Image (spheres, rainbow, N blue to C red):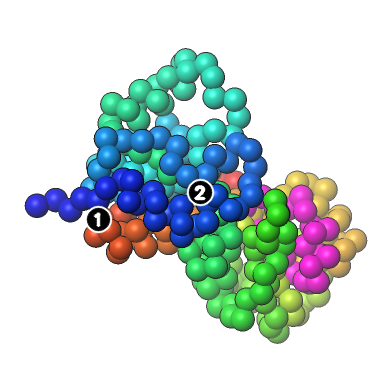
Amino acid sequence: MKAKAALAALVKHCDGLLRTAAIGDYDGAVNGLQVENSGTVTCIAATVDASLATVRLAIAAKADLLIVHHGLFWSPTHPWTGRKYELIRTLIENNLAVYSSHLPLDAHPKLGNNAQLSAALGFKKLRPFFASHGQTIGFQTAMNLSRDELVARLARATGSPPRVLPGGPKLCRRIGIVTGGAGGDLKIAAAGGVDTFITGEGPHWTYALAEELGLNVLYGGHYATETFGVKALAAHLSKKFLVPWTFLDHPTGL
């Protein structure tokens, strides 16, 4: 008999676990259940971005719940015509629910992107770091690690070499992590006392700013640094609710 769980139970658990209502975020994040299904989950799919492409991948994987980090509602979502109509029609016709968690998943101390990437890099004794929307979302650690070794570790963790802005010391002593698109906030990172900052991506002008701040910056890729949280959350739900899960890799290269 196929294992199944109630969608409402999974959503309630996620909302409590991730403190969805308590964590501030961008208006378009719309954290929590974004699309319902008929009420039952037999297979969970996890991916970074909600899009027509990843929805189709989830359907091919026979999932009825899609866990995402970047949800459906970042910009005005009306009218429902063209590709938007195709997206909502595909979700409804295939009974696929969508649960999205942005900053709540970034900030979670165990399952979050920052905690999971820190673990993959071998960091221990983590401390809160980097305020955003009313709470800290990242972590920092104190250690003695060469910049070259840190670059190599990040490449192994994400599967591709990072872009390096070598504005700081060759020996990294205080390292901060905020996955995703925090490159535009190097001053916030430097004010946190780190000499090395790991994030996903940033604009061109941050190279000169990193030199000015005396800060090493490692851009590991927005997508690549944010695969960790959805995988960890889906694996947790699979273990708790006894339904299978799969990761849908749809890299952007950014």
Q: Residue furthest bottom?
A: 144
Q: Which mark is residue 243?
A: 1
Q: Residue at x 68, y 58 (%)?
A: 135
Q: Residues within 10 Å of mark 2 (few under 14, many from 20)?
A: many
Q: Which mark is residue 101?
A: 2
Amino acid type assigned to the residue bearing label 1 in the image: Val
Q: Is 192 inside the magenta-drawn segment?
A: yes
Snapshot quadrant of residue 95 = top left
Residue 132 place in picture, x, y as percent: 70, 54
The mark nearer the N terminus, 1 or 2, is 2
**Region of the chain picked out in magenta, as a range:** 180-199
Residue 201 place in picture, x, y as percent: 67, 51
Snapshot quadrant of residue 131 = bottom right
Residue 240 place in picture, x, y as percent: 30, 63
Tally the numbered discs.
2
Q: Residue furthest right?
A: 212
Q: Circle 2 — which element?
A: loop
